[in-house]
Image (spheres, grey):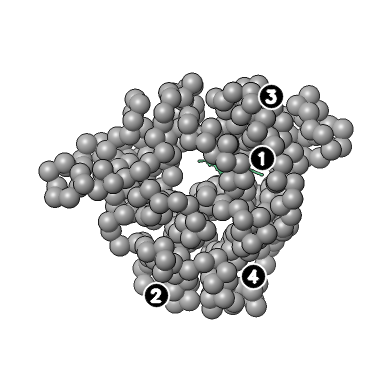
Amino acid sequence: FDLRNEDLKDLRELGQGNGGSVKMAEHMPTGTIMAKKIVLIDAKPSVRKQILRELHIMHDCNSRYIVSFHGAYLADPNICICMEYMDKGSLDGIYKKIGAIDIDIVAQVALSVLEGLTYLYDVHRIIHRDIKPSNILCNSKGEIKICDFGVSGELINSIADTFVGTSTYMSPERIQGAQYTVKSDVWSLGISLIEMALGRFPFSESVSDDSDLSDLEGTLSPARPGSMGSIAALSLPVRKKPAKDASAKKDKRKSKGVSLQGGGMTMSILELLQHIVNEPAPKLTPEGRFPVEAETFVDGCLLKDPDARKTPKELLNFPWIERAKATPVDVEAWASTF
Ligand code: ATP
Ligand code: MG
């Protein structure tokens, strides 16, 4: 059906991200509850229309591992993207509420994300580009699905134009300016799995305990051998134009481990990105706390060389995932505990 803004009644806010906010809304003519993502886009009308056309592909993305799409429309200056409402929210919200997630549930998350990625890539040649716990959603039926994948090149451009890419789930090769491939999604999955299993972002220990890097500003010493050379090699989606109301938004948003200043980046985010490029990949530690199969799986996701790193399809055959398929835990029962 055709979605119109006046037919949607906002019920409550579900969360805020870099690009905008997400509201729970009721489509009054049908009584359907949806999640309405409002994205502020600083682009010409022709580009907005192009984005809407590109978003149309999402109507064809039908998989039990992908959040379904109800439709999108322009509501100047925003684009509204309406999708399936997932009543248990995102995996980051869940672990922040209940603490570290049981490794058998994490295995089901891994299985669902791999199935979703394989579907998107095999059927539509879509690379997700933004795998992280906040883009993995759960509902009370025990379904786990991914959302916010990069279907629209123009939308990706328009958002990158307005905001600095702050993603710390970014793979070493992406940080160094290489193209996205499905292997970059695999890296992001590996980081996300450790985060869920530990109940904290895996790099936070090495960078800052409360994930607020602002106190590290300026700690990157240019005198350190090689450091400037590596920075020069970094290729980041840096803001080209000042975001219109980025400062107003920033207050509302929780700091997500990066701090931005003026028109550029502080040293702290460079330090984190440098760490990803130069240091060994994180692991599922401490040793012995998790099944060896889980450790091996995460190691396969976090090979720093993208050529050596596994594809989603290969990872679906790893013993940890085979076991998750053979002996599924009751995600529905788990989801009823919070
Ligand atoms: P970023 O903007 O960096 O991608 P994000 O994923 O947290 O971060 P949004 O995509 O705007 O930002 O989502 C904000 C929050 O809204 C999410 O963290 C999630 O908890 C909630 N949310 C998003 N989509 C849905 C949905 N379909 N159903 C229920 N909750 C959702
Ligand atoms: Mg999101």
Question: Along the line of sight, which residue is nearer the eye, 269 or 304?
Answer: 304
In this rendering, position of residue 152 left or right of residue 187: right
Circle nearer the N terminus (4, 2)? 2
Residue 167 x %, y %? 43, 44
Residue bearing the label numbered 1 = 54
Q: Under tag 2, what secondary structure?
A: loop
Judge the density around disc 3: few (<14), some (14-19), many (≥20) Cα neighbours within 10 Å: few
* Number of the front mark, 4 or 3: 3
Most distant residue in the right direction: 29
Judge the density around disc 1: few (<14), some (14-19), many (≥20) Cα neighbours within 10 Å: some
Numbered badge on residue 329: 4
Disc 3 residue type? Ala
Numbered badge on residue 288: 2
In this rendering, position of residue 263 left or right of residue 5: left
Residue 144 visible within the image: no
* Number of the front mark, 4 or 1: 1
Judge the density around disc 4: few (<14), some (14-19), many (≥20) Cα neighbours within 10 Å: some
